[in-house]
Image (cartoon, rainbow, N blue to C red):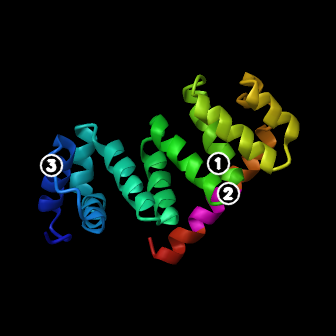
Amino acid sequence: MDPTNADAAVDWYHEIEAGTGRLGDLTEALQQYDAVLETPFFLLELLSLDNLTGLYYDSGVISYTLGHHDDAIRRWSEGVRNCPEEVLLHFNLAATLLEVGRPDRAAQESIELLRRKPGHEDAWHNLAVSLQSLGHGSAAAAAMRHESSCLEPGGELSAWLRQVSREEEWQWNVQQQQDGT
């Protein structure tokens, strides 16, 4: 299938969602997801069908499965920007960031997830591991105990999180300029 054909890409995406798609060629799958994500009209259609989250999630999973962790992070980050309430995007993003040695961003995503779903056990674990590796021992211990003070905007970590957010925003803007967008 021609990855530049957005109509075919949307049909292919719907086949996957229905469980009838061809799942063997992961590289082709990424090309099809990209064709949909790069076509604004189809993004609007997916938004109206509440399928946009699945598009970001699934394309990130395929990238991760292929060992392309940076691409998975990029896809899930984009998904979080466009679908900020989706817990699973935050979780996969945080877990992968932790795996590739970015505990600062992993902690930030874990906190965002826990603010939406405070009972998410794995997110508490990721937050504790992230904070411990960053040298925030007391905050890591609080995360292991699931203390909500870790999540409070005015809490111990709020100044640190604001700094990480500013740095991430700056890096994202630089990347967008380099990409010519």
Q: Are marks 2 and 1 in contact (CB under 8 Å)?
A: yes
- Residue at image position (46%, 76%) is 180
The vertical placement of 116 against 70, above or below, is above
Residue 31 in the image: above or below residue 116: below
Amino acid type of the residue tagged 3 in the rendering: Glu
Q: Which residue is mark 2?
A: 102
**Residue 156 in view of the camera:** no
Specify the segment rendered in magenta.
167-173
Say what secondary structure mark 2 lies in: loop
Residue marked by disc 1: 106
Check disc 1 and give the amino acid type.
Ala
Crowd around label 1: few <14 · some 14–19 · many ≥20 (10 Å): many
In this rendering, position of residue 22 left or right of residue 172 = left
The residue to which callout 3 is attached is 15
Q: What residue do we see at 21% from left, 53% from top?
A: 42
Quadrant position of residue 52? top left
Which structural element holds mark 3? helix
